[in-house]
Amino acid sequence: MAQTERLAADAAGVERATEILRSGGLVAFPTETVYGLGADATNAEAVAGIYAAKERPSFNPLIAHVDSLDAALAQGEFDDTAMRLAKAFWPGPLTLVVPVAKTGTISDLARAGLDSVGLRVPAHLLAHALLAHVGRPVAAPSANRSGRISPTEADHVLGDLEGRIGAVLDGGPALVGVESTIIACLGGPPRLLRPGGVPREAIDAMLGQALDSVADETGNPLAPGMLESHYAPRARVRLGVSEIASGEAALLFGQDAPRGVEAARVALNLSESGDLVEAAARLFSYLRQLDASGADAIAVGPIPNAGLGEAINDRLTRAAADR
Ligand code: TXA
Ligand code: MG
């Protein structure tokens, strides 16, 4: 890829960053917590680019950043508690995980196929200006390569991602330095998924009750299964198949179809040209379509384990193990 542009914290910088994001490119931008690696959350191929740039070996649901509560309400269903939390702590280092709204436009890949969505309105002037200009939710994990520490300066971002992303919007150091607090409001009591920039005490005081935790202080789940963490189809999933049984739904990749594909109930090809970015962008919506066909099993042809193939195979392996 071409050199990464370093954009100044001014109107021209925001304009250029907006142009890149709206055309499906990647832009790192400052928030009050850490620098995020942003992509248009409504564009699954753009979101796939985040994983490619970070070399992240698995798809996790990403936080979608918006410029206002109104923009968030178009994406998620807010119950009373979510509404109170949003009004008390936005803009700020709080992410709310809520059910997807009917009007939602955030791609399956940004949600890792879940029916919920993580939303946040950051408290950073430059982030706000950018999100307002883009006019679409921006998916953004921290702007570091997988396994490295979260960046709080534009130079950290360039150290990790130079040449892999379109631009970094340089807004100086991020002030909070730890990531946002994540709370799930999915019906029932709100639950803390990740401790972060808004202290638990402040949340307890506002809610007038102690928040249930799903995570310990490092963000690791206390009780596995308390929160759905990845998409699982109803149908059984068979991986790396060389022969499809009659009536199965088939998920294919590239040109080498497994034997028996004519007898499949329905067959979808993640990428006929063998493009792993295209395949990642389609993965969750194709799984849903195949599951909706009513087949008992989804047979998946071999997918190379290079590049984004590793994250694709990781999700498929989890889906297969779930049954
Ligand atoms: O401060 C932050 O939150 C930074 C800045 C850039 O905003 N972003 C960040 O994103 O930390 P990331 O991708 O590292 O964290 C996303 C985490 C996921 O690992 C997951 O735990 C949670 O947010 N999350 C997002 N959507 C979710 C969902 N639908 N269900 C459960 N967890 C979700
Ligand atoms: Mg991170």
Image: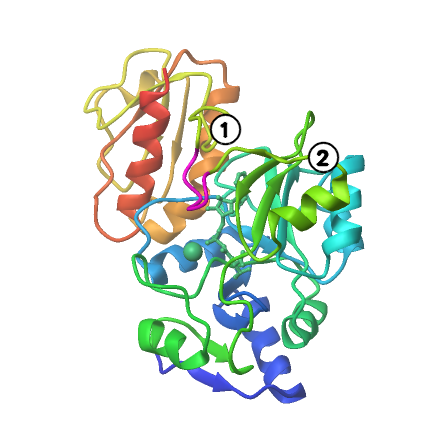
Q: Residue at x 37, y 53 (%)?
A: 277
Rendering coords of residue 150 (x, y %): 41, 64
Q: Which residue occupies the foreground of this view, 225 or 76? A: 225
Three-letter residue code for mark 2 = Gln
- Give the prevailing secondary structure in the magenta stretch: loop
Identify the mark at residue 228; answer none if there is no mark. 1
Q: Is residue 106 visible?
A: no
Q: How many marks?
A: 2
Residue 75 forms part of the magenta stretch: no
**Magenta segment:** 216-221
Quadrant containing the C terminus in the rendered view = top left
Mark 1 lies on a secondary structure that is loop
Q: Note whether ligand 1 is within 8 Å of mark 1.
A: yes
Q: Is residue 255 left or right of residue 136?
A: left
Rendering coords of residue 81 (x, y %): 76, 37
Quadrant containing the N terminus in the rendered view = bottom left
Q: Residue at x 54, y 65 (%)?
A: 33
Up-down relation of residue 212 to residue 305 (above or below): above
Q: Residue at x 46, y 85 (%)?
A: 6
Q: Name the residue furthest left.
A: 242
Three-letter residue code for mark 1 = Glu
Quadrant in which residue 124 is drawn:
bottom right
For marks 1 and 2, give the CA distance: 24 Å
Rendering coords of residue 281 (x, y %): 44, 47
Rendering coords of residue 80 (x, y %): 80, 36
* Neighbour tally class for label 1: few under 14, some 14-19, many 20 plus, Cα within 10 Å: few
Q: Residue at x 47, y 57 (%)?
A: 141
Labels 1 and 2: the sequence-earlier one: 2
Mark 2 lies on a secondary structure that is loop
Quadrant in which residue 22 is drawn:
bottom right
Q: Is residue 309 left or right of residue 6?
A: left
What residue is shown with label 2? 209
